[in-house]
Image (cartoon, helix red, strand yellow):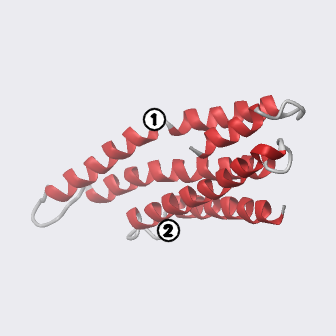
Amino acid sequence: MAGSLVAMAARTSPDWDESGGVAAQAEAIRARVTPLALADSEAYAEVLAALASTSGGRRPDLAAALRRASEVPLAIAEAAADTATLAAYTAPRCTASVRGEALVAVALAEAAARAAARLVEINLAAATHDPHHERARRALADAAAALRLAGEE
């Protein structure tokens, strides 16, 4: 949704020389995210299967399933951070009549990054040194910085 708002704000700003490139970037991010909804449900199904299978009271595949399940929200967090950054760049440059949509896109993308980063944290609670934690924190920090930047304009 946020990416669509950015693309729309860019497309309706014909006096902005970079509008075509920004719209294309927004569409590319949307293309990255679209298949992740199905991938997320499939990854979580693996977690549920690992939880259901026990081997002498142990669930040997659970840690691996949780790590795989963390990859989808991580990809979402990173795409959301990219969207927030692009939307914050767009807001002061697009036509004034669609500036609100760009600002809403920043807020939506930051919220998506926050939610997805939290899922990474939950999925990897037992794996505190997994590099996915740092990548999710970085994505969230980038999205939060974009939200602050957009609020200053």
| Residue 105 percent location from the top left of the image | 65, 50
Q: Residue at x 14, y 55 (%)?
A: 53
Q: Marks 1 and 2: which is nearer the front?
A: 1
| Residue 47 percent location from the top left of the image | 27, 54
Q: Residue at x 31, y 50 (%)?
A: 44
Query: Is residue 113 left or right of 6 when viewed as pictured?
Result: left
Q: Amino acid at mark 1?
A: Pro
Q: Residue at x 40, y 67 (%)?
A: 122
Q: Residues within 10 Å of mark 1 (few under 14, many from 20)?
A: few
Query: Is residue 29 left or right of 100 when viewed as pictured?
Result: left
| Residue 149 percent location from the top left of the image | 79, 62
Q: Quadrant of the C terminus?
A: bottom right
Find residue 64 and name its label.
Answer: none
Asked if residue 36 is positioned above or below residue 153 in the image, the reply reads above
- Between 76 and 99, the one lying in front of the other is 99
Q: Quadrant of the N terminus?
A: top right
- Between 80 and 120, the one lying in front of the other is 80
| Gap between marks 1 and 2 measured at Cα | 28 Å
Q: Residues within 10 Å of mark 2 (few under 14, many from 20)?
A: few
Q: Amino acid at mark 2?
A: His
Asked if residue 34 is positioned above or below residue 61 in the image, the reply reads above
Seen from this angle, which residue lies furthest front?
97
Helix, strand or loop for disc 2: loop
Per the image, the residue denoted by label 1 is 35
Per the image, the residue denoted by label 2 is 129
Tell me where residue 51 sits by quadrant. bottom left
Helix, strand or loop for disc 1: loop
